[in-house]
Amino acid sequence: MVAASETLKLSARADTDVAASYRRIRAATRALCEGLETEDFVAQSMPDASPTKWHLAHTTWFFEQFLLKQHHRGYQPFRAEYEYLFNSYYQTVGSMHPRAERGLLTRPSVAEVLSYREHVDRHMGALLNGRDSEDRVCELTTLGLQHEQQHQELMLTDLKHLFAANPLKPAYRAARTETSVPPAPLRFISFDGGIVEIGANGKHFCFDNETPRHRQFLERFGIADRLITNGEFMEFVREGGYRRPQLWMSDGWSTVMTERWQHPLYWSDDLEAEFTLSGMRALDLTAPVTHVSFYEADAFARWAQARLPTEAEWEVAATSLSSTSGNFVESGALQPMSAGTQPGLKQMFGDAWEWTASPYSAYPGYSPPSGALGEYNGKFMCNQMVLRGGSCATSAEHIRTTYRNFFYPSARWQFTGVRLARNF
């Protein structure tokens, strides 16, 4: 993620009213906490997940560290110890509390963290007052807001993992009443390939890992018109997909054996129900399968006599659409929804992050920005896979065609799903 102007290639132009965006996005984070009990803010269910309280504090730390301390004359930090407690991985800034032990931070209290947010918000309001949208401070604030929207999604997925670990299986939000519509049979849409351009052009906000825009050659390919459903993945499970090593990458099969996977994360062992942010619900066979790892997505694709798309193929297909609309967090569903029966490419945006066959690596010509903010993306370009499209927990305004998400291939706690591709 990175720096604008000479050190950070964020965007050609920031939001026209950054102060208003700041207030709105920060308020949206707090709104996600409505209905939580104090105890819900503190617990950590696994090393990859963080407590809600930590997310609230870390996103605030970001603005304090990279804006207020550097650009607001006379600013006094809320508490000096927070530089250590709520740093995530910015080695250039200094040492940090171990990630796997964030759930041990019973202090500062939730109330004190909320006071910290109010303190920083008040000073950020003063810092942004009267600023031109192309000001360096506004560019960095836009970066911080994009960072906060990433943590909004993490708050939801981390809470889901936490609540799933509780024998009471509590609900985060009441379930919406929805009518499930079976999707049309899966079909593949062909694209000619040839020399294509992918990546961000710098006209709008982007993270550094989306740049530079560059050319690639693609063979003709076909991409599925929708995501794979729970019902379709169920066939893979019932036909012994988790017991057939020939379908799996070697690392994937080792993970299946070690972790004893038998079905997607959050499915019940009888394959009748799944845990959702609304608690346990009957498994909707018409909805996209989610919470599967890259290994599972790849094994399913082999079983289906297909493959996963590359990220370049995905971006070319997505660019053919006129908008990035979809089932995002704003819909309130907090669950993937059936694709329905309309023709054409569906669910390219929202519903579930889509695993691609592409390792997360630098685009040709990329060089990481200098300084602490240059640690945001570049140093993670190893041993991870690219995902595209956003999910039902992503903010609609956060996603774009060139957005590159990335996770380790064994990760399952995000809303990650499967779209197939084929050679044509």
Image (cartoon, helix red, strand yellow):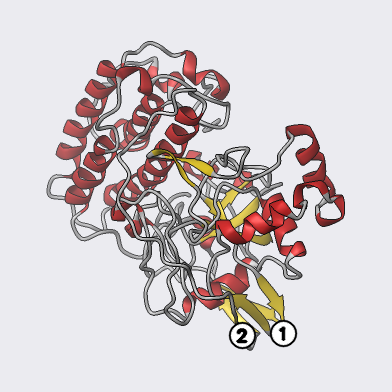
- Residue sitting at the far left: 130
At label 1, counting other C-alpha atoms closer than 10 Å, the crowd grade (few under 14, some 14-19, many 20 or more) is few
Residue 107 is left or right of residue 214, and the answer is left
Query: Residue 28 placed where, x, y %?
Result: 25, 43
What is the number of callouts on the image?
A: 2
Gap in Å between the C-alphas at discs 1 and 2?
A: 7 Å
Residue 390 drawn above or below residue 377:
below
- Residue sitting at the far right: 246
Residue 423 drawn above or below residue 234:
below
Q: Which mark is residue 233?
A: none
Q: Image quadrant of residue 156? A: top left
Residue 313 is left or right of residue 398, and the answer is right
Q: Residue at x 61, y 71 (%)?
A: 312
Q: Image quadrant of residue 209? A: bottom right
Query: Residue 371 placed where, x, y %?
Result: 50, 41
At label 2, counting other C-alpha atoms closer than 10 Å, the crowd grade (few under 14, some 14-19, many 20 or more) is some
Residue 397 is left or right of residue 344, and the answer is left
Q: Which residue is mark 2?
A: 190
Q: Are marks 1 and 2 in contact (CB under 8 Å)?
A: yes
Could you tell me which quadrant the C terminus lies in? bottom right
In this view, the residue in front, 182 or 103, is: 182
Residue 114 drawn above or below residue 183:
above
Q: Which residue is mark 1?
A: 424
N-terminal of the pair, mark 1 or mark 2, is 2
- Report helix, strand or loop for mark 2: strand
In this view, the residue in front, 94 or 118, is: 118
- Report helix, strand or loop for mark 1: loop
Amino acid under disc 1: Phe
Query: Residue 128 placed where, x, y %?
Result: 19, 44
Q: Residue at x 32, y 36 (%)?
A: 63
In this view, the residue in front, 54 or 118, is: 54
